[in-house]
Image (cartoon, helix red, strand yellow):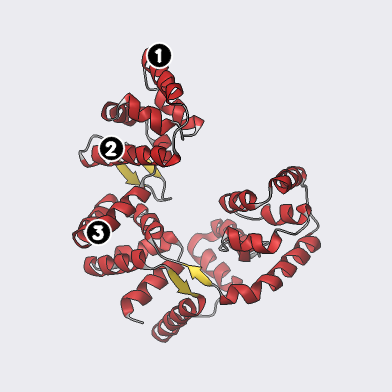
Amino acid sequence: MDAIRKSAILLLSLDKPIAKEVIAQMPRDLVEKVTLQIAQLENVSRAEQEKVLDEFYNAARERTPIERGGLATVNDLLEDALGEEGGSILESVKQSMSSVPFGFLHNVAAENLLTYILEEHPQTIALVMSHLKPNQAAEVLTGLPSNKQLEVIRRIANMEQTNPEVVKDVEKSLELRMMSTLNQQLDKAGGVPIVAEILNLTDRMTNRGILETLEEDDAELVDQIRRLMFVFDDLLKLDDKAIQALLKEVDNSQWALALKGASEEIKEKILGNLSQRAADMLREEMEFLGQVRVSDVDAMQSQIVDAVRRLEDAGEIVVSAGADGEQFIS
């Protein structure tokens, strides 16, 4: 395994904000190589990931002597640095160290999880889903049979406090059943979406320089990355001034098709920036279209995202990444 691939796997194993800080310290030429490798990665086995992490850990341990850790050491450090204010930070650290129920499921693909819980009682499924990330729980819900979806949602809505012992029993049982399979499966890692997420966390100058260099070798890859760095749903993050600039770039017929597949919030955002007469005309045009193909809607939404990028490149709107990775318009 070459060093670039190892670096890519290591970065993908870090939390994205930490990965961003690491990338910021790397030479530009190395960033370009590693970013390209990340984009090209598809599946990385658990064994390969563990090998990279073990190698990194051993190398770091040899170079950096680590003093005794533990909460007592943390307490001493915080007292020396912050005095009484360190107490609240220590409490936060203690809470973070507490085990999260079903935490081992947070990186499991929904389709894999469904294999193990599909035949469970709705109450058990509801208990598991209530401890998942919202987007992950939504994917699981979608995969359930329609007759079970309603039962599970009703039970989640009515769920109150659950005996911790019951939670532990269900968690342990599920973990034991999944462990042998999870150890054999390939973990999904890398790919264009991960590159887009990482670059979304970097400043505009950094990600533009990387993308421009990558574009010389693979323009199609860069186009895929850019499309994921700002998606149609992100129009909600634009202020009214930016929306009005976008309205000048996109025809009513284009908006009519794109908004057929949009959320009510986005429709209100666009219509709210039009005059009453123009908004009524757009609504009529949307109704006149009738049924449309999803692929046509997706294609039109991509064209509008492209228009956002053109406006940004022209300096008419400014999209910058915040510290939390959110998009802001100034």
Q: Nearer the viewer, residue 301 or 6?
A: 301
Q: Which mark is residue 307?
A: 2
Distance in Å between CA atoms under marks 2 and 3: 21 Å
Q: Nearer the viewer, residue 120 or 242?
A: 120
Q: Residue 216: x, y in percent?
A: 18, 60
Looking at the image, can residue 100 be seen? no
* The quadrant where residue 3 appears: bottom left
| Residue 263 left/right relative to 111 | left
Distance in Å between CA atoms under marks 2 and 1: 24 Å
- Disc 3 target residue: 210
The residue at 31%/69% (across/down) is 34
In the image, residue 21 above or below residue 6: above
Q: Nearer the viewer, mark 2 or mark 3?
A: 2
Q: Which mark is residue 276?
A: 1
Q: Nearer the viewer, residue 165 or 60?
A: 165
Q: Residue 118: x, y in percent?
A: 70, 58
* The quadrant where residue 111 appears: bottom right
The residue at 78%/51% (across/down) is 161
The residue lying furthest to the bottom in this view is: 62
Distance in Å between CA atoms under marks 1 and 3: 43 Å
Task: Give the amino acid at mark 2.
Answer: Ala
Is the C-beta separation of discs 2 and 3 under 8 Å?
A: no
Q: Secondary structure at mark 2?
A: helix
Q: Classify 10 Å Cα crowding around label 1: few (below 14), some (14-19), many (20 and above).
A: few
Q: Which mark is residue 50?
A: none
- The total of numbered circles placed on residues is 3
Q: Residue 196: x, y in percent?
A: 36, 55
Task: Give the amino acid at mark 3.
Answer: Ile
Task: Give the amino acid at mark 1.
Answer: Gln
